[in-house]
Image: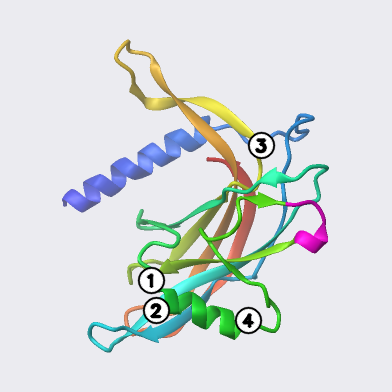
Amino acid sequence: MKRVLLSVFILCLITSFSLGAPEPALVPGLDVWTLNTEFSPTPLQITLKGTDNNKFVRFWYIIVTITNKTDNDVDLHISSDLMTDIFDIIPAGKNIPSMVFNEIKKRHKLKYPFLELYGRTDNVILQGEDNTKDIAIIWPDFDKKTRKITIFISGLSNETSVVEHPLLKDETGKPIKIYLRKTLELTYALKGDLASGTNIGLSFLSKRWIMR
């Protein structure tokens, strides 16, 4: 019962906040940039045998290709979360053994020979296609009740905005200011039987830019 009440509260909070949040500008300012970003059509999965109990453990990952087609070298500080439809939020790169990335790199060595790991890439991306970065973003497996996931990737643009929180207030009674960044949102539906772990996959639903 507590979980249901908590889920309802979170849903109301997300809904009310989304209604008040601005969208990215249709015509960005002169100093606003957005990096050119491509990504694998759907997140892929990899299963490896764990070290503790010798059972196979599933991980999910997506490969993003980032190219700086702006007029300047820019700072690159990307962050990413995966959110399920049961309100679990999983930060990328958390509790990921190093062997997971090593296996992913082997799997894609022909197409992405210079694949980098999320969180381990340089913090500056130089101009031009010669300086394109391929980055693997990895998450641990999610709850078996999940039927849809949404991936958020921020740091691909320097566009920001400020909104007032719909519920929280400061000590003076004024709404707390929330600072938002232009964020890439990717949504996928799960297919297969998560409970048994067979024929599991993802199908693409939507892509959009939001302020988050």
Query: Residue flagged by tag 1: what amino acid is it?
Result: Asp
- Residue 103 drawn at (x, y percent): 51, 83
Return the mark for residue 45.
none
Task: Give above or below for 36 relative to 194.
Answer: above
Q: Which residue is mark 4?
A: 108
Quadrant assignment, res 110: bottom right
**Element marked by disc 2:** strand
Can you see residue 76?
Answer: yes
**Element marked by disc 4:** loop
- Residue 112 drawn at (x, y percent): 68, 76
* Mark 4 or mark 3, earlier in chain: 3
Q: Specify how the rendered protein is coloured.
A: rainbow
* Mark 4 or mark 2, earlier in chain: 2
Task: Give above or below for 32 relative to 57.
Answer: above
Query: Residue flagged by tag 2: what amino acid is it?
Result: Arg
Marks 4 and 2 sit apart, C-alpha to C-alpha, by 18 Å
Please tell me whether mark 2 or mark 3 is closer to you in this view: 2
* Mark 1 or mark 2, earlier in chain: 2
Task: Give above or below for 65 relative to 32.
Answer: below
Return the mark for residue 58.
2
Please tell me whether mark 1 or mark 4 is closer to you in this view: 4
Q: Which residue is mark 3?
A: 24
**Residue sitting at x 35%, y 57%:** 86
Marks 4 and 3 sit apart, C-alpha to C-alpha, by 33 Å
Marks 1 and 3 sit apart, C-alpha to C-alpha, by 31 Å
Can you see residue 201?
Answer: no
Range of residues picked out in magenta: 126-131
Label 1 close to label 4 by CB (< 8 Å): no
* Mark 2 or mark 3, earlier in chain: 3
* Mark 1 or mark 3, earlier in chain: 3
